[in-house]
Amino acid sequence: MVKKIIFLKNRNLKKFLFLYTIDDMKDEDIQQDIELDESKEPDFHPFASAQDDSVESDLNYVESTEDGEALPTKDVAKKLREEIKTLRKEKEEYLTGWQRAKADYVNLQKELDLARVNVAILTKEKMTDKLLPSLDSFEMAFSNKEHFDKLDKDWQSGLTSIYQQILSGLLASGIEKIYEIEIPFDPSIHQSISIVATDDEDKDHTVEKVLQVGYRIGDRVIRPAKVTIYEYKK
């Protein structure tokens, strides 16, 4: 014997209607029962679509088996726990994906910032490299005191002013000269050309003279300074 029960909660009638029961009945009997139920409730049409918009909201849906029977409470709870477990797993996956995407974005921003800095440094380095021959010419002119002093004073002032303007522009761009003497020899910024003997132990391995000025951008050396260094000998 197969039984199927459909409950419909009518908000206006405030009660549950028992629509029909199939219990090995004949088609004629089922039709008579349906007609009888309809005659008892002439104003109520549960499956009508035009007059009452609230009919669909009156249906009370419950968890059921494939046979249409309501699930036991423990089975409903088990199903809810499984759904919660699935939702939590999905949440963790979404959160992990979002965190990974955020980390990738932050790393990309750092890489772009570093790339911009490197491009700026390379641009300054190439500019300075092209200016080096002119700067060296100024340095050679100033180092030859005998010939430079023979120039007209206005010429001397003009050359010195131009040279200082170029150096000021380089300094404003973060480019510095390497020209100090009597400082410890540093192979990262100095290139030793020759050694000068000294009996002063304090001068051992210090810069005696700068033969060619060097340049750098921060810790990045564009060109090391060519120098002579002291070497202590007893």
Image (cartoon, rainbow, N blue to C red):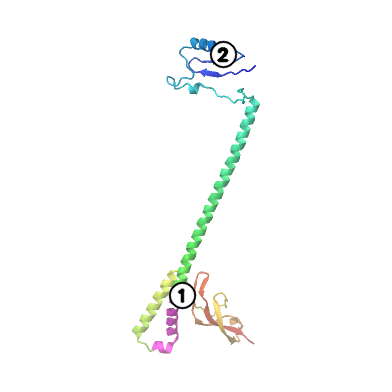
Quadrant where the C terminus is found in the figure: bottom right
**Residue 27 disc label:** 2
| Rendered view: 113 above or below 124 | above
Query: In the current view of this chain or complex, which residue is farthest to the front?
Result: 27
| Rendered view: 170 above or below 144 | above
Of 28 and 121, which appears nearest the observer?
Answer: 28
Between circles 1 and 2, the one closer to the viewer is: 2
Residue found at x 54% / y 47%: 98
**In the shown orientation, is residue 148 left or right of residue 89?**
left
Of 126 and 192, which appears nearest the observer?
Answer: 126
Q: CA distance from mark 1 to mark 2?
A: 103 Å
User: Disc 1 or 2, which lies upstream in sequence?
Assistant: 2
Label 2, residues with CA under 10 Å away: few <14, some 14-19, many ≥20:
few
Label 1, residues with CA under 10 Å away: few <14, some 14-19, many ≥20:
some
Point out residue 124 in the picture as x, y percentages from the top left corner: 45, 70
What range of the chain is rendered magenta? 131-149
Amino acid type shown at disc 2: Asp
Amino acid type shown at disc 1: Asp
Quadrant where the N terminus is found in the figure: top right
Residue found at x 63% / y 33%: 81
Predominant secondary structure, magenta span:
helix
Q: Which residue is mark 1?
A: 129
Q: Do the CB atoms of the residues marked 1 and 2 lie less than 8 Å apart?
A: no
Of 137 and 36, which appears nearest the observer?
Answer: 36
User: In terms of image quadrants, where is residue 193?
Assistant: bottom right
